[in-house]
Amino acid sequence: MEMDSIIIGIEILVIIILIVLNGLFSLAEIAVVSTRRIRMQKIAEDGNKRALLVLDFMDNVSDFLSTVQIGITFTAIITGAIGGTTFSEPMGNFFSPYIPYSYQLSFIFVILVTTYFTILIGEIVPKRMALNDPEGYSLKTAKFMQVSSWICKPIVRLLDSSTNLALRIVGSKPKEDVVTEEEVKLLIEEGIEDGTIAEEEEDIIKRVFRLDDQKVDMIMTPRSEIIWIDLEDDLEENKERIINSKRSIFPVAEGELDDFIGVVQAKDLLSEIFSGKDV
């Protein structure tokens, strides 16, 4: 009897450890998937070696998720098997004098209770924790996932090969990743929040996107329509040209536009002219 109690105690401890392991896999999965790459790169640049592991998981997300799935599936199966065999029989023996099918009902009850705690402690709680601080928990679980990835590597390779074979059979081809304008803007906003992108840089990038929405003649003037200051023309002619034009900046050339010298602002030039200074 005492030996049976020790065995049951050990099996309960094993179940608790398995549920905690399940929770670690769930925690790592959501943490890494939710982690902002820009922020993790900044942490890695500061010399954090665990951040390099997290970035490696993000670069090889398929292998990472396969490792997580293997870990969760394995712990869930073992937890259910141990829980069912450990508690259902003594519970069935206890209730057999009172209710029919006590063994079957006890087995179902034990599975339901084990599943409840597995979902609660092994799934929901760790996933919510990961969403609250993805970068922090990514770093905390990095070593654990590194060891798990090494252990599961042969199975992951087998699953990867089997998956690729199945996809070829059904004729499914992977889509090329296309980064959209909205995704780039989102990354810019994250960079500003993290301090890795200055507001001036944000303004430059946004102007680049606006260029795509404009016609060429809205931002560039055809050569034949350029109004420019010719140094070989007399002062009155150039002054008339500036006054009659609605432009504020003029190219300056000598003889022909190909001999470009620079640009001048109309207000500065007219100010010099009307003040009587030599231009």
Image (cartoon, rainbow, N blue to C red):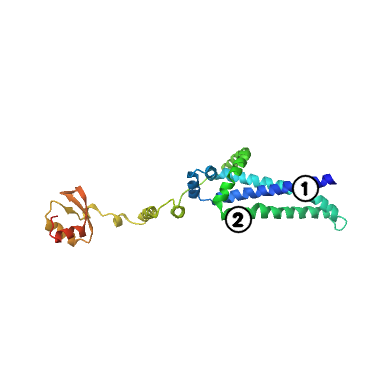
Q: Is residue 271 left or right of residue 76?
A: left
Determine crowd level at label 1: few under 14, some 14-19, many 20+ residues with C-alpha closer than 10 A: few
Residue sitting at x 50%, y 44%? 44
Could you tell me which secondary element the residue under label 1 belongs to?
A: helix
Would residue 158 be seen by someone viewing this image from the given angle?
no
In this view, the residue in front, 128 or 242, is 128
* Residue at the extreme right of the image, as rendered: 97
Quarter-of-image position of residue 238: bottom left
Q: Residue 173 carries which label?
A: none
Give x and y (percent) for residue 212.
37, 54
142 shown above or below 121: above
The amino acid type, in three-letter code, at marker 2 is Arg
Quarter-of-image position of residue 147: top right
Q: Do tag 2 and tag 1 residues touch (Cβ < 8 Å)?
A: no
Q: Which mark is residue 128?
A: 2
The amino acid type, in three-letter code, at marker 1 is Gly
Q: Which mark is residue 9?
A: 1
Would residue 125 be seen by someone viewing this image from the given angle?
yes
Give x and y (percent) for residue 177.
48, 47
N-terminal of the pair, mark 2 or mark 1, is 1
Could you tell me which secondary element the residue under label 2 belongs to?
A: helix
Residue sitting at x 80%, y 45%? 6
In this view, the residue in front, 242 or 35, is 35
Determine crowd level at label 2: few under 14, some 14-19, many 20+ residues with C-alpha closer than 10 A: some
Give x and y (percent) for residue 20.
67, 49
Q: In this view, does 117 lie to the left or right of 267?
A: right
Give x and y (percent) for residue 118.
69, 52
* Residue at the extreme top of the image, as rendered: 154
98 shown above or below 28: below
